[in-house]
């Protein structure tokens, strides 16, 4: 069967977000060739790393 190989386990959840903020996330996702979901995860990881809560790229 063709398609993407299975990736890491993810937990789905609903997100309420300001439409203008979502549009900015969509623009950055398009520029980085990512899905909106992947971009949101990248942005959260970057914010947590800046706060010192993540040490490496794969640490959760």
Image (cartoon, grey):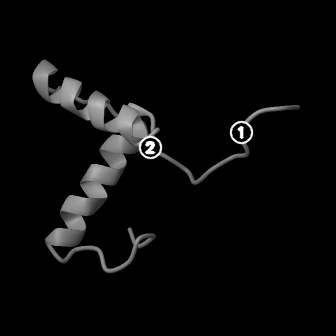
Q: Residue furthest right?
A: 1
| Residue depth check, mark 2 versus mark 1: number of the one nearer the observer | 1
In the rendered structure, the answer to whether residue 7 lies left or right of residue 24 reads right
Task: Tell me if residue 60 comes above or below residue 16 in the rendering.
Answer: below
In the rendered structure, the answer to whether residue 55 lies left or right of residue 59 reads left
Q: CA distance from mark 2 to mark 1?
A: 18 Å
**Disc assigned to residue 43:** none
Give x and y (percent) for residue 26. Answer: 30, 28
Quarter-of-image position of residue 46: bottom left
In this view of the protein, which residue sits in the foreground, 13 or 29?
A: 29
In this view of the protein, which residue sits in the foreground, 7 or 9?
A: 7
Q: How many numbered discs, if any? A: 2
Point 15% across, 19% down: residue? 19
Residue underneath mark 1: 4
Task: Quarter of the image for the C terminus: give it.
Answer: bottom left
Quarter-of-image position of residue 36: top left
Residue underneath mark 2: 11
Give x and y (percent) for residue 42. Answer: 34, 52
Q: Give the SS element for disc 2.
A: loop
Give x and y (percent) for residue 43. Answer: 27, 51
Point 25% across, 34% down: residue? 25
Which of pointers 2 and 1 lies earlier in the amino acid sequence? 1
């Amino acid at each position: 069967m063709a398609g993407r190989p299975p990736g890491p386990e993810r937990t789905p959840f609903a997100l309420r977000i300001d439409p203008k903020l979502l549009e900015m996330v969509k623009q950055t996702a398009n520029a980085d060739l990512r899905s909106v979901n992947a971009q949101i995860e990248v942005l959260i990881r970057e914010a947590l790393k800046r706060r010192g809560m993540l040490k490496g790229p794969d640490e959760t």
